[in-house]
Image (cartoon, rainbow, N blue to C red):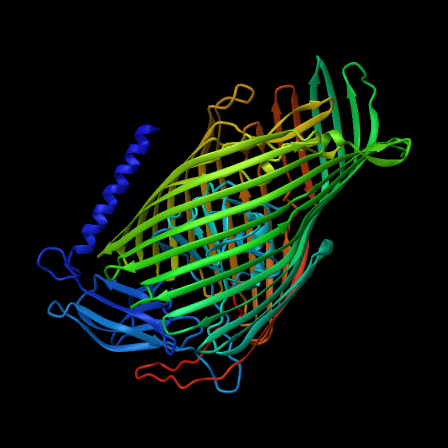
Amino acid sequence: MQRFKSLTTTLLLLSLLFNLGLAQRPPGAGQGNRPATSVSGRVLEQGTNTPIQYANIMLHTSGSGESITGTISDDMGYFNISAIRPGKYYVTVKFMGFEELRLDSLTITFATPTAELGEVFIKPATVEGQSVVVERERTTMEYKIDKKVINVGQDIASSTGTAVDVLENVPSVSVDIDGNVELRGSGNFTVLIDNRPSILEGNEALQTIPASSIDNIEIITNPSAAYDPDGVTGIINIITKKSKLEGISGIANLNAGMLGQLGGDILLNYRNDNYTVFLSVASNSRVFEGNSTSESRTTVMDTVFTVNQEGTRRFERGGYRIRTGFDYNLTDHDVIGVKLSTGDRGFDMSHDSKFESFNTNSPTPYLSRTEASSERGGTYYDLKGNYEHRFSSPTHRLEADFSYSERESDEVSISEQFDADGVQVSGRKTIEDGPTSQSRLELKYEQPFSEEGKFEAGYQIRTGVSTDINGLEDWDSISDAYIVTPSTDFDTEYQRNIQSLYSVLGNSFGKFGVQGGLRAEYTFRNIAVIDSNEIENEFEIDRWDYFPTVHLSYNITPLKKFMTSYTRRIQRPRGWYLEPFVTWTDAYNVRSGNPDLQPEYINAIEVGYMQYFGKNMLSLELYSRQTENLIERVQSVYGENVILNTWDNVGNSLSLGSEISFRYLATKWWDFNLMGNVYHYEINDQPSTLNQNISSDNWSLRFNNNFTLSKKVRLQLNAMYNSPSVSAQGERDAMFYVTAGARLTLIENKLSATINVRDLLDTGDHSSTSEGLNFYRSQTWDGVAPIVSASIKYNFNSYKSKDRSQNGDAMNGGGESAEGDDF
């Protein structure tokens, strides 16, 4: 491991030196004596001079109009098409919601090998006095040096849901039938919303974002040092829709489905040359129901206790969210913004189960029934402010971001047991009150030092304070009431302070791109646990951590790219993993946190290749992820017939795999995306109480199909398979399910309806087993399926066209549905 760290540091220093060397090499130098040929420029929005990211630039042969090659503009609007044969050409520039621009009379010769187009202005497509909305076509995945960008504008299967439903069709991400998200096989990832961390946990945050508000998703599996290093497998950054039009615009959605699914959202936006104001309101509820069975065996003092369970379970996730804010241009170089969001989120679980219990000394079964319920959630609010100053260019800027948030996280769990005659024999109620406050301040500075080179540095401080007040009440058969048990009362105070310094240096020369970074973080964390006797125990962390990152890319051609990267990351335990008190989930299961948990450290290496074949695209990635201090759920015997669930550092893990994504336009009416992930997973150096050196070979496959039957009717059919896998104490069986959707345009560019069917073939059942010292457990889940839901969407806007004519523009009309600001 020490040699690996030394090699990493050496690579980082070499890459930075190489990067500086590239910055000083004269641009445009070709191989040998033959000059390099290229067409370059920058795409900006006319009137506002805003850089246009992901604009499509195509090079055509004059006369025949044949498309020769092309590229996509970067995040600051720059583009470069190289390795062009001498000849006469013209260039087209296209971007959704803007008029197509054609630039004629380009001649490439060895005497004049380059065509510098300079700043190219495109303008929003508007029609005087009426709304113009163009449905966005599905776009291909775009590789950036440190992330993948996926446009999700036409995902039918996600139209009735949240961000979780969108992620079912995104490479590197898997979603099970219960809506649990994993990134490269792990649920430990970070969620950003418009490049800023969400106040909620990852899966909670994704459940609150309406699918209709999402513009694109950035999958960042190996983030640079400019990002927070938290998260085992990386970052999912949700980029929300923003208006490109002036005046008032917006979108409204309603959706409903089986089992009580109900939701809706509305986004309104007003924009002019000086400011933007937005309002977003959303409410969603998702329900999962099904039958569960389990068999548990525990051994206490040579006696084997067996419990068989059969029953029904219901899970409901939901809540509402209100968000508003504004951005104001103080000057041509200064912008301020304020955003406020508030809402309520909740997770409710209930189950009614029959139990059959016996042991080796008393083989006659004891029959009982358990009713259990759990409610978790609460209100929250989040205030954000930002200031940005641009110097001589948009890439030379200083930015300050501040946020403060508070969240209530209350939980009440009740478990009641009844005998065969329906008489209550026991009961437990666990109550937890958990207010949390967080604040964050970040200062960032960016400065370009060449056309493609950029230096970035920043300072960040994150603080958090939370309190968990926990109590237990036992049911008393004499008084027929719950009575407080003082000995089980705990107050837990959690404080954390993380301060970071980072810098990132990036540059490109010709076909090569290099980016290197280093982040240093100081962490102070203290957990104070006060029991009912006022005795306090403290668990403290006081340390420095260092996180180097290196990213390299090579543009073989404008349509072929090769990349590789190395990053070091950290995964800190979640707050509820650390709470050292017991919560009863039913008469036979309890859970407890572990305040001695150490953070996970991850070393990740990736190699990727992407190629476009006309409108088709192929991407292939190889990856290695080594994790120290792996955190997993651990089960043990709590008592007769009772299993304790907690979390522990179970050793080190290694994932070695490959991921492939292939999008193919088979016909004019059918295109599909085939995504696969194959990896080897192993856990080593586990404690003696756990299984030693376990491993498995895993694979998953997703096949997403889109059918355009007519201008008004589109269909979608998606299938997903996950192979069996292992954990520290058990195995998870394979799972397969299919979803289908259909979209009907009722009023062109205005009103559309969608129907979605989840788990179409009722094959989404899953099961698992776990075993350890003195216990064994098997579990199955058979969810209600298929689940049908439907939605209706209405686009509206009211804006005025402005005379922004420019010589050479191709006035093709068109536009973008103005769908509000970020949610």
In the image, farthest residue toward the left: 33
Please provide percent x and percent y for residue 240: 50, 62
Q: Is residue 817 visible?
A: no
Number of disc labels: 0
For image coordinates 33% across by 49% down, the residue present is 503
Q: Nearer the viewer, residue 475 or 604?
A: 475
Which residue is at a point 28% across and 77% down the rendered structure image? 103
Q: Residue at x 71, y 13 (%)?
A: 301
Q: Position of residue 749 (x, y in %)?
A: 55, 75
Q: Is residue 294 left or right of residue 705?
A: right
Q: Is residue 296 above or below residue 757?
A: above
Residue 156 picture location, percent across and down: 56, 61
Q: Residue at x 47, y 30 (%)?
A: 629
Residue situated in front as seen by the camera: 750 or 205: 205
Q: Determine which quarter of the picture holds residue 24.
A: bottom left
Whole-percent x and y of residue 376?
69, 46
**For this rendering, which residue is in front, 523 or 668?**
523
Report the quarter where the N terminus lies.
top left
